[in-house]
Amino acid sequence: MTVLRVVVDQVLAPIAGGIGRYAEELTRELIATAPTGCSVEAIVSAVGPDEIERLRTLLPGLANIERLHLPRRELSIAWQGGIVSRSVRSGLVHAPSVLAPLVKHGRSGEAGQQTVATVHDIVPWTHPETMTPHGVHFHKAMVKRAYRYADAVVVPTHAVAADLNEIHRFDDRLRVIGGAPTGRLSVPSDADLRAERLGLPPAYVLAVGTLEPRKGLRFLIEGLAHPDAPTDLPLVIVGPDGWGDVDVLALAEEAGLAPGRVKTLGRVTDADLAVAYDRATVFVLPSLAEGFGLPIIEAMHLGTPVIHSDAPALQEVAADAGVSVALSPRDSYAERLAQALFQVVHDPELQRRLAIAGPDRARMFSWEDSALETWQLHADL
C-alpha cells in the first residue's frame, strides 16, 4: 500500500484563510481520487481531540491521522530549524503550504522519502509591509529550506512560478497546480431566507477575503467614496479578521462614506457565501498581490461580474473573463476602481458578457484535476 501523507495543520488554524481552504479541498479530493493501492493520511500538530474529530468530519476517508507532539507554533519553529522527527520525514509527504518537514535526503525517490512543499505567493519578497515581520521571516526561511531539500515545489500559477524562480532556481522542480471552487459552493433552496438573515441589500458590491492590508480594501472603500463611483451602492465584505488592524468601518468613515454603506459579515458558511456571491451586483478583488485569487473563480462560478487588480496571478486566473484595473500608479488606484465599478454597474451589455464568460472560465478549474495532477507529480518523482 502506497501512503501519501498530507500536512493538513492549516485546515485547523484559527484563521485558516485561503491556504486552509486549499489544503482542505485538495486533501478531500486526493482521498477521492487515490489510485488503486494508495491511501491518504493526515499530519497535524498537537491539537485537541475535538479538532481531531473535526478533521475526520471535514476529510472522511483518511486512512490515519498522525498527531505530532508539538503545538502549531512550536512545530513551525522546529521545522524551520530542520528539527523533524524520523516518523514524519519518511514516506511520501505532501505539504499544501510552506509548513513542510524539509530535511536533507536523496531526491531520486528511493528509500521511501519524498517531500513536496507548496508556495502560494512571493508576497514576503514583493510586499513584506503587508505581512507581519514573523510571517515574512518564516516564509523566506521555509522557501530557502524547500530550495535545499524539497523534491518538488507546487505553485498555483505560472506567474508565481516565474517570480519564485527569480528568487531561487527551482527550475524543473516547480509544478503549477491551481485551486478551484469548492463543490459545496452552490445556491441553496432557502436563499431568500439566508439573504434576509445576512441583511443583504438589493444591490451591492461584494469583497471576500481575510481582512489584512494586502487585500487592498482601503482602496476599494476610497473608490466607493470617489465621485466617479456609482452613487449609494453599498459594500458587503465577507471574511475573518486578520492581522494589521484593518478596521473597514473606520476606513469608510475616513473616506466620507455614509454610515451603513459598508457591511461586514465575518466568516460565513459555504451556503451563505454562495448566496452573497450570487446576489452581488459585482464582485471586486482589489488585492495588491495574490498567488492565485480563488474568490475570483468562486464569483465567476456563480455568474457574478468580476473586477480585479492587475496583479499578474489574477490576470492569469481571470484571463479575459473579468475587468482588470491597473494597480499603478498607486495614488490613483482608488479612482480607477471607482471608474470600473461605474462601468460594470451601468453597462448591461458588459454585465451580460461577464456573466457568460465568468462561468466558462471557472469551468477550467477543478479540484479533481488538481488532485490528479498532485498524484501524478508524486508518481513522476
Image (cartoon, rainbow, N blue to C red):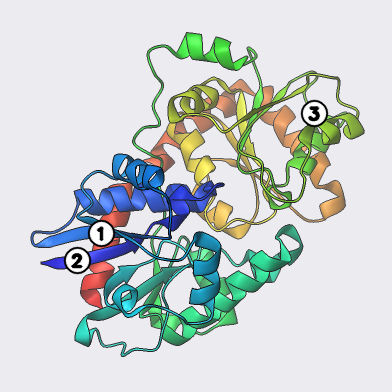
Nearer-N-terminus badge (1/2): 2
Residue 229, numbered label? 3
Q: Residue at x 61, y 75 (%)?
A: 140
**Which mark, residue 375?**
none
Q: Nearer the viewer, residue 262 or 225?
A: 262
Percent position of residue 292, x then y:
52, 54
Residue 319, compared with residue 357, is above or below; it is: below
Q: Nearer the viewer, residue 14 or 230?
A: 14
The front one of 346 and 62 is 62
Q: Circle 1 sits in a helix, a strand or a loop, which is it?
A: strand
Q: Is residue 274 above or below residue 321?
A: above
How many angstroms separate mark 2 from mark 3 (CA)? Answer: 54 Å
Q: Which residue is mark 1?
A: 41
Tell which circle, 3 or 1, labels the residue nearer the N-terminal end.
1
Q: CA distance from mark 3 to mark 1?
A: 50 Å
Q: Amino acid at mark 1?
A: Glu
Which quarter of the image is occupied by the N terminus? bottom left
Residue at 45%, 49% (x, y): give it: 12
Q: Quadrant of the C terminus?
A: bottom left
Q: Amino acid at mark 2?
A: Val
Residue 259 in sight: yes
Q: Are marks 1 and 2 in contact (CB under 8 Å)?
A: yes
Image height of 273 relative to 72, above or below? above
Q: Are marks 3 and 1 in contact (CB under 8 Å)?
A: no
Residue 365 is at least partly visible in this image = no
Which residue in the protein does label 2 denote? 3
Using the numbered discs, state the Cα–Cα distance from disc 1 to disc 2 in whole angstroms.
7 Å
